[in-house]
């Protein structure tokens, strides 16, 4: 995972090919106490679905945007 800040907004770059990837992102999002998460052009994988379910279970709004619409 790569992380940066843009205009005081934490940005995380990750792929979701394993449960470890999900855990890393969940920890990072937990540290910043996010209320919503935007996934942009993230490949649709079983692990992305797992992450979405876990985020929603914590009451976090999940938005997914893809260039394929």
Image (tube, rainbow, N blue to C red):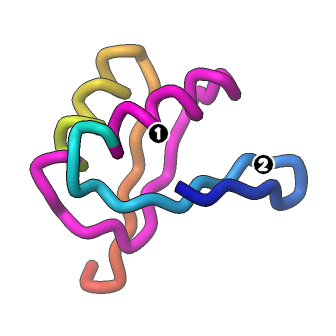
Kindly identify the residue that appears in the image at 36 percent across and 57 percent down: 64
> Does the magenta run of residues contain 41?
yes
Relative horizontal placement of residue 10, taking residue 14 as reference (left or right): right
Residue lying furthest left in this view? 46
Q: Residues within 10 Å of mark 1 (few under 14, many from 20)?
A: some
Residue at (46, 26) in percent of width and height: 60
Q: Position of residue 23 (x, y in %)?
A: 37, 31
Residue extending farthest to the right is: 7
Task: State the residue in front, 44 or 56.
Answer: 44
Name of the residue lying farthest toward the top: 58
Residue at the spot of label 2? 9
Cα separation between marks 1 and 2: 15 Å
Identity of the residue drawn at 54% across and 36% down: 36
For marks 1 and 2 on the same chain, the one whose residue lies earlier in the sequence: 2
Indicate which disc residue 45 carries: none
Q: Residues within 10 Å of mark 2 (few under 14, many from 20)?
A: few
Q: Which mark is nearer the camera, 1 or 2?
A: 1
Magenta span contains residue 9: no
Image x and y of residue 33, in percent: 65, 22
Q: Secondary structure at mark 1?
A: helix
Residue 69, given in percent of the width and then of the height, sits at 27, 78
| Span colored in magenta | 21-47
Q: Is residue 3 left or right of residue 37?
A: right
Question: Going 23% across and 38% down the picture, which residue do you hit?
Answer: 19
Which residue reaches farthest bottom? 68
Compared to 45, does 9 lie above or below? above
Placement of 32 over or under 52, stated as above or below: above
Which residue matches tag 1? Answer: 25
- Residue 44 is situated, as x and y percent measured from the top left of the image, at 18, 63
């Amino acid at each position: 995972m790569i992380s940066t800040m843009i205009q005081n907004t934490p940005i995380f770059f990750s792929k979701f090919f394993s449960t470890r990837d999900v855990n890393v992102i969940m920890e990072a999002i937990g540290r910043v106490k996010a209320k919503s998460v935007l996934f942009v052009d993230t490949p649709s994988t079983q692990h992305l679905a797992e992450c979405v379910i876990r985020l929603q279970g914590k009451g976090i709004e999940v938005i997914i945007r893809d260039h394929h619409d």
